[in-house]
Image (cartoon, rainbow, N blue to C red):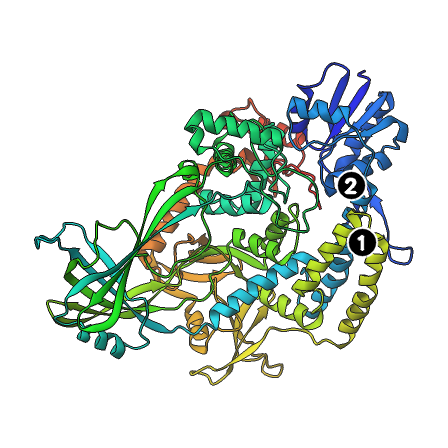
Amino acid sequence: MAKNLVIVESPAKAKTIEKFLGDDYTVRSCFGHIRDLADGELSVDVTKNFLPKYIIPEDKKKVVSELKKLAKDAEMIWLATDEDREGEAISWHLRETLNLDEKKIKRIVFHEITKPAILRAIENPRSIDENLVNAQQARRILDRLVGFELSPILWKKIQPALSAGRVQSVAVRLVVERERAILSHEYKSAYKITATFYPVDAAGKKSDAILNAELPTRFDTAGEAEKFLASCVAASYSIANIEVKPATKSPSAPFTTSTLQQEASRKLGYSVTRTMVVAQKLYEAGHITYMRTDSVNLSELAIEEIKNQVISNYGDKYSNPRQFTTKSASAQEAHEAIRPTYPNKPVAGSDDAEKRLYDLIWKRTVASQMANALLEKTSVKINISTNKQQLLAEGEVLKFDGFLKVYMEQNDDETEDEDVSGMLPPLAVGQNLQFIAMQGIERFNRPAPRYTEASLVKKLEELGIGRPSTYAPTIATVQKRGYVIKGDQDGVERPYSIYTLKNDQISKEGKTEVFGREKGKLFPSNIGMIVNDFLVANFEKILDYGFTANVEKEFDEIANGDIVWQNMIGGFYKPFHDTVEETIKTSARVKGERLLGTDPTTGKNVYVKLGKFGPVVQIGDADAETGEKPKYSRLKAGQLVENISLEEAMELFRLPREVGEFEDSPVIVSVGRFGPYVSHAKAFYSLAKTDDPYTIDNARAIEIIEAKRIDNANKNIATFDYEGKPLLVLRGRFGPYISYDKGNYKIPKGEDPEKLTVEQCIEIIKAKPEGAAKPKGKRFAKKS
């Protein structure tokens, strides 16, 4: 047995580190947290200074047992969990759970998994930082208190199985408020004037290049735009002024957790969760530094290595070493930014996802140490002989690419129009321009865009809510709970007008454009909006952005040893608990119900409200005397309880609808609990996501039926009869299996499912536990 036991969080990290240490070291993984608050109960004694009750989950008992045995035989135990509050807490839990002798443990930290970093950490051990542990405990306990007390209120006042969280509920509020701002947005149009010209030289020869220009101001009405165009009839145009200004563009800082999540979303299309999963793999393989950080700092060694790389690849003039400063005053630990551990390695990763993310990190890091890009911005004013106003043309020339040779950051800004800026043809003051055309184009103002995962992370960071380790779990949790939906939205057409001046004639043209099209945006669900409104109405302080940010600051103060964590929790809990008690007594049950009007056919009331399985429209009320029951229809995806109209609601009752016949039986389209479907001859067939149950025709319905029949036929390998019951050998999602008497049984490897006899099937059934056809998903420990 090795003298030294090194305990890390993940098995992948253990394998990497084991390569760097000699035979005297055994490296093992604890697979994340080995101890946590018990599920299903509060697990915090509020009468004993918020004493937590930790348990070892069932799936960690074997790991703990193995670690205890290894620790008992080792002379020294090195706790090498991550260098943040969660990692510190895991080390503390290891010490407490394994009953480790303080004299036998050393805490080591590193922000990159390289041999020098690991050896340097071993040479500089420290003790467990109790302040960091307390900060993590405070967050965990506070979140448990909030969730455990708020969730039952939601069950009683809205519907069962709902839950609330301190940071997650604030994130939902942001999405809900943005949605309402969009829904209430008043669209106004204005007319933008654009013009095109051919520059003309002194000899009167026109250039082949086209000069684009526009009027700096816009007109509120079509009449004003048309009047301006009329004033330009028969006008001549010339260059009034040319202003050339040098400009520079500086590179962005190296990645922090939030900026990596934002840029990976914009450039690679990764969700924040996927970004962190892929980054974790890169870190554990030793390719990048620690991926949970809010620092933009680079080590002096890294700066020097990157400098050498830049000079080697691009030359001296491209090198400009610089140190960035973290703007956030709440930066937790003295980590570096996320960077390649080996800057001279431009490619790394075991699969395409890892390689793409590594490429992004490498380019961003290298670019941060490169020279500014040098630009020349040109602004040209154009005289109109018949009008005092001037047109403006703008362009820029890249004089030196600098860091742009490697990397250009994107942003979330949505531009309203195409930019007329670009390369300008050679021009001179006083030069005449040959008029081509001028247009007055109607343009509409836009509301703030819906959040993407990346822009929501950015907003949370701006508000001081959450920390590097919490962004991805927060975004994932609100979607998992069904409060926020990530999805797309089809746009709608709207008309707009274009007035064109050409050949001294003004013409008007009506066109249509699609607006409101969204892709990969975050939408609040109906239940998300209702839960949010209830929490804001009754727990305004908990959902206040400033309050939530201040709680984060208090966690930081605990981590610095400035305040006692029990005092911080105590100051929060008493008033919060009183509000909970008062809300239970006084608040009314939320039905989420609106009276939309009356059914034009029956005269009965039409409501929209939350049903057991989601939002529904209801026609009529239950009548105990006559036994009459109301009619219900589910809302379409994207329809909201708070703004659906009576007309839209009545449209939902077109289902179920008969679309035709097939094989002498009616084909009916409807929507059920599990979505839209076709029913035919007592069989049911789900519609594809691209099928609209309100417009699908009989031909498409038959296509779905026949495709499912073929699929079912291919699924069935063999059919037997055993003791009067069907015994089936089938193809399934997880491989071939046997189905018999309501049980499913996985077929062992090596057995040919097409050659199985009924006797062999019975042997497999007797040997295997029921339900083995679908393998259980692996459980991974999560930082919470």
Tag shown at residue 89: 2
At a point 85% along the width and 54% down the height, the residue shown is: 566
Q: Under tag 2, what secondary structure?
A: helix
Residue 668 lies in quadrant: bottom left
Q: Can you say whether 778 is above or below 514 in the image? A: above
- Taking depth in this image into account, of 527 and 677 the one nearest to the observer is 527
- Taking depth in this image into account, of 742 and 561 the one nearest to the observer is 561
Q: Amino acid at mark 2?
A: Ala
Q: Amino acid at mark 1?
A: Glu
Instruction: Point out residue 262 in the picture as x, y percentages from the top left corner.
Output: 52, 48
Residue 372 lies in quadrant: top left
Q: Can residue 422 be spotted in the picture?
A: yes
Instruction: Point out residue 384 in the picture as x, y percentages from the top left corner.
Output: 20, 68
Q: Nearer the viewer, mark 2 or mark 1?
A: 2
Which residue of the protein is positioned furthest toward the bottom in this rendering?
603
Task: Report, in whole angstroms, how far the alpha carbon at label 2 lies from the one at label 1.
Answer: 21 Å
Instruction: Point out residue 755 in the picture as x, y percentages from the top left corner.
Output: 50, 25
Q: Residue beneath label 1, please?
A: 41
At a point 82% along the width and 17% down the height, the residue shown is: 3
Q: Residues within 10 Å of mark 2 (few under 14, many from 20)?
A: many
Instruction: Point out residue 19 in the picture as x, y percentages from the top left corner.
Output: 66, 19
**Image quadrant where one finds the N terminus:** top right
Which residue of the protein is positioned furthest toward the right in this rendering?
48
Left or right, residue 398 beside residue 555 = left
Left or right, residue 188 beside residue 649 = left
